[in-house]
Amino acid sequence: MSFINRKDVSKLIGFSSDTLRYYERIGVIPPIKRDKNGYRDYRPVDLDWLFLVKCLKDAGLSMEALIEFAKLNQSGENEPAQKAILQEQLEKLNQKSAEMKRTRNLLEYKIDTFEDHIAKFKSGEMDADHVDELWKMDKFQVHKQK
Amino acid sequence: MSFINRKDVSKLIGFSSDTLRYYERIGVIPPIKRDKNGYRDYRPVDLDWLFLVKCLKDAGLSMEALIEFAKLNQSGENEPAQKAILQEQLEKLNQKSAEMKRTRNLLEYKIDTFEDHIAKFKSGEMDADHVDELWKMDKFQVHKQK
DNA sequence: ATAAACCCTGCACCTAACTCCTTAGCAAGA
DNA sequence: TCTTGCTAAGGAGTTAGGTGCAGGGTTTAT
């Protein structure tokens, strides 16, 4: 009689059972306790960890980074490093947010100027000026400075 | 004498020259005109397209979707469909933004309650209540309703 | 006139992150 | 007891999105 079984966890967190096994194998989640049949028996602490994994994954962490984080957690003695990782990821997330905003601006600009753009394209009048317009947008300021 | 060569384009937009060739092969960008040596000769209209491709890719479009969009553009006669794709992507971008905000909330919560969490973990007191706390967060409302 | 620094093509190869397949054990209902 | 449905393990296969390499041509500076 499992506390929470593989299928429930799948439904709850949204990782397939194959993925859960995969994550355990590569070390993204710690080895899960088993019941008398050798079936995985997920505990609240495991779910908690899975929530965090999902969150960090959504935030864009690679599996490699997640394994690193899991190791720190299991070794126990490195809380500041763990907290630092979380803070660093929060920072990255904020940067990504800002980048997305720039992308949205470009997309909005493209939609606004769509008819005009098509007309130019058809008449073969697409010129460097239009590219310059794009170039001036926030979206590409990062590149420009390189 | 190329208008703009492969390397310049790389620097400008941030796709490697191998990637540019790959994109051309799979149809994400139209066949680029060549100079007398058969070297690619990127024109403003191509750069304009590449800007848009970069933008849509950053916004999370798959190569498949980009190829679809490129085909529509090259066939010429389907502006409403093209504009619709842009608008659809803008919509997706907005959704992703919202999702990111939820992820950020969870991450902030995790950082705020980090010491507390560690203490509980060490004493083996991690229980269903904590998981319930996470469960109540916005971040997981989507799943919950499934 | 030779080397350095570009460019071309086709195709094999790579990495990340799963996902599926096979073979097999346990378990609860008709 | 037979069937249905869960679980296990290991390993092969898949997909997306490139990346690298061999073998060749061109251009420019020295």
Image (spheres, coloured by chain):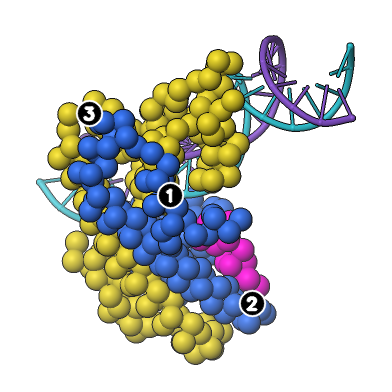
Chain colours: A blue, B yellow, C cyan, D purple
Mark 3 and mark 1 in contact? Answer it, CB < 8 Å: no
Taking the image as shown, residue A139 lies to the left or right of residue A123, namely right
* The residue stretch that appears in magenta: A61-76
Q: Are the residues flagged by discs 3 and 1 from a single subunit? A: no
Quadrant of the rendered image containing residue A119: top left
Q: Using the image, determine if residue B141 lies above or below residue B118.
A: above
Task: Identify the disc placed on residue B123.
Answer: none
Foreground of the two, A6 or C12: C12
Q: Using the image, determine if residue C14 lies above or below residue A91.
A: above
Q: From the image, which quarter does the N terminus of chain A lie in?
A: bottom left
- Amino acid type for the residue under numbered disc 1: Asp
Quadrant of the rendered image containing residue A127: top left
Question: Residue under circle 1?
Answer: A132
Question: Residue under circle 2?
Answer: A81
Taking the image as shown, residue A143 lies to the left or right of residue B108, namely right
At which x and y percent is residue B63? 38, 38
- Amino acid type for the residue under numbered disc 2: Ala
Read off the chain for label 2.
A
> How dense is the environment of label 1, judged by Cα within 10 Å: few (below 14), some, or many (20 and up)?
few
At which x and y percent is residue A143? 54, 55
Residue B110: within the magenta?
no
- Amino acid type for the residue under numbered disc 3: Gly
Foreground of the two, A1 or A135: A135
Question: Residue under circle 3?
Answer: B76
Give the foreground label among 3 and 2: 3
